[in-house]
Image (cartoon, grey):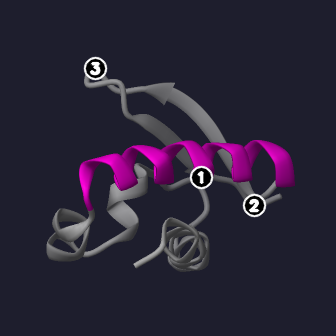
């Protein structure tokens, strides 16, 4: 699957989140689906998702990173 397709799936999946919910990009995929994505594609997907959030002023906000350097996000009601 193309990384742009994965980005589209991730963005669409955020519609299922509740306001105020904090999540990682990997939380937007079922565990077995996330594990099937190549590591290089996961890294690229993370970058593309962050750029999407920052560029589109979406109802998502990038917050702190975890101790393993994964970007955390929060869904807002904007």
Residue drawn 36% across the image and 52% down it? 42
Q: Earlier in the sequence, mark 3 or mark 2?
A: 3
How far separated are the C-alphas under marks 3 and 2?
27 Å
Left or right: where does residue 39 sit relative to residue 74? Answer: left
Residue 77 is marked as: 2
* Residue stretch in magenta: 38-57
Whether the residues at callouts 3 and 2 have beta carbons within 8 Å, the answer is no
Tag 1 secondary structure? helix
**Circle 3 is placed at which residue position?**
67
Q: Main secondary structure of the magenta part?
A: helix
Q: Are marks 1 and 2 in contact (CB under 8 Å)?
A: no
Question: Which badge, 1 or 2, comes first in the chain's sequence?
Answer: 1
The C terminus - image quarter: bottom right
The image shows a total of numbered marks equal to: 3
Picture coordinates of residue 75, whole percent (x, y): 62, 55
Q: Which corner quadrant of the image does residue 18 belong to?
A: bottom right
Residue pointed to by mark 1 = 49
The reply, left or right, for residue 67 in relation to residue 49 is left
Give the image location of residue 7, x and y in percent: 56, 67
Please tell me which of labels 1 and 3 falls first in the chain: 1
Q: Is residue 39 above or below residue 36?
A: above
Residue 2, position in %: x, y? 48, 73
| Magenta highlight on residue 56 | yes
Dot 2: element: loop
Residue 37 tag number: none
Alpha carbon separation for disc pair 1 and 2 = 19 Å
Q: Quadrant of residue 27?
A: bottom left
Q: CA distance from mark 1 to mark 3?
A: 19 Å
Mark 1 vs mark 3, foreground winner is 1
Q: Name the side, left or right, on which 63 lies relative to 28.
A: right
Q: Is residue 27 left or right of residue 53?
A: left
């Amino acid at each position: 699957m193309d990384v742009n397709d994965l980005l589209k799936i991730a963005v669409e999946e955020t519609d299922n989140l509740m306001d105020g919910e904090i999540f990682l990009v990997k939380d937007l995929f079922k565990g077995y689906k996330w594990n099937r994505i190549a590591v290089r594609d996961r890294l690229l997907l993370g970058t593309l998702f962050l750029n999407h959030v920052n560029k589109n002023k979406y109802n998502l906000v990038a917050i702190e990173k975890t101790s393993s350097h994964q970007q955390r996000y929060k869904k807002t009601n904007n």
